[in-house]
Every structure is written in C-alpha cells, then in structure tokens.
Image: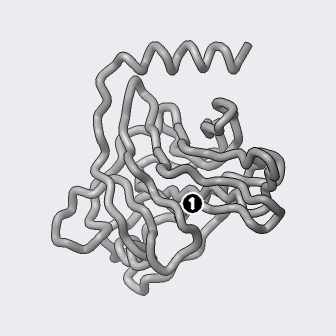
Amino acid sequence: MKRLSLLVSLLVFASIPAFGYNLVNSSWTEVCVFSTSCSVTVTDYSSTVLGSGKLQTRIYQGQPGSTGAGKYVYEYRVDLTQVAGITYPPSVDSVAIWNAGPLLQFDYNFDSNATDQVYVITSGGLGTKGLSSSYLSGGWSYFNINPPVYAGSYPGGGESSYFFGFASDYAPTLRTIWVHTDSGWVSVTGYAPNAP
C-alpha cells in the first residue's frame, strides 16, 4: 500500500512544473568550501539496494572560518558494484528526497559564480556515473542518473555513481529516501535534512 500511495503521489506531482537546480561537476576540492584546510571528518550510512547494492549517504558540517561554516553537507552514492545480473542486470537511475528544504548556493566548481546548488564529484572520488539533471517538483528533490548505474554480470563487476551532494541549513536525520530501480521505486534509510 505504501508503494502504491507513493506512485500516486509521484504521478500527481509529475504534472506540477519542476524547478531545476543549478547542477555542476566538481572535484574533491569542493570540500574546501566547508573547510579552510580542505579536510573534514565525515559520517557515513549505507542502506541495501537491489540485494548486494547500497545507497551510501555521507554528512559533515562546515568548519569555522570557511565559506560554508555551520552549514550541513549531504552526499549520496549509488553503489551496485557487488550486484550481479547475468541475463538482465538491474539498474538505478534516480534518487528522490521528500521535503529536503532549500538547497543552499555556493561556488562548488570555483568559477567565481556562487549559484551552484547541486554538485557531482567527477574527479578525485569514487564512481563513474554522474547526474544528468536535478530538480524540485511537488516537494520532491530528484537527482537523476543518466545513463543509469548498472549491476554487473558477476559480483564486483557492477557500476557506481559518483558522489553527488548539496548543502543545507538543516541538521541531518535518518529518514526515508527513495531510489528508482528498473523495477520501480524502493524506499531506503539515509541521511537527509530535517527540514520543517
């Protein structure tokens, strides 16, 4: 019933105009926005997706003296490296968060324009698949991966997305995050802003 109600909600919201987030590719140096030493201590949490896969969520807080001091940073990675599908490899192509609150604007790619809302760490980090789009629609923040992240033909042969993320004024809490697989939406637990 929970899955049906989500599907109905998503179909209703599909007719609502979307607001595109300003999405940029960056590198591991985006952390320098939140630390004067370009180094932070992170907290990770992983939930199972498609059997042996996972949605990895990562949080940390901006350090004093940095541009993003006091702000909360949220990063996500879809990891299907250990998922195997010999005749039909499953895949993931989207992550959705309900009521993430406003995504703050910073200069994640260091082009002197502090209007970036979502970043993808395409250099100096894990993964091979990036985001094709990210937007807000009907209270849902979507992070779309295209081409999708696929499982492999053997364990260890699957793919991973890059880490992608955003910053928020709101502290983290463990809550429901939705992942879209080739079989439909599934719910997992991960860190997201505790927006009112």
Q: Is residue 65 left or right of residue 1?
A: left
Q: Is residue 7 left or right of residue 37?
A: right
Q: Position of residue 2 (x, y in %)?
A: 70, 18
Residue drawn at (32%, 54%), measured in percent from left and top? 23
Q: Is residue 146 visible?
A: yes
The crowd level at tag 1 (other Cα within 10 Å; few <14, some 14-19, many 20+) is: many
Q: Is residue 7 left or right of residue 100?
A: right
Q: Position of residue 45 (x, y in %)?
A: 70, 57
Q: Residue furthest front?
A: 87
Colour style of the rendered protein structure: one colour
Q: Position of residue 147 (x, y in %)?
A: 50, 51
Instruction: Give the answer, above or below, for where 70 lies relative to 2.
Output: below
Quarter that holds the N terminus: top right
Residue drawn at (25%, 74%), measured in percent from left and top? 110
Give the residue at mark 1: 161
Q: What is the quadrant of residue 41 in the picture?
A: bottom right
Instruction: Give the answer, above or below, for where 11 lies relative to 100.
Output: above
> Please, what secondary structure does the residue beneath circle 1 have?
loop
Amino acid type, label 1: Ser
Residue drawn at (53%, 16%), measured in percent from left and top? 9
Q: Position of residue 156 (x, y in %)?
A: 78, 68
Front residue (pair 47, 146): 146
Q: Is residue 73 visible?
A: no
Residue drawn at (45%, 31%), measured in percent from left and top? 140
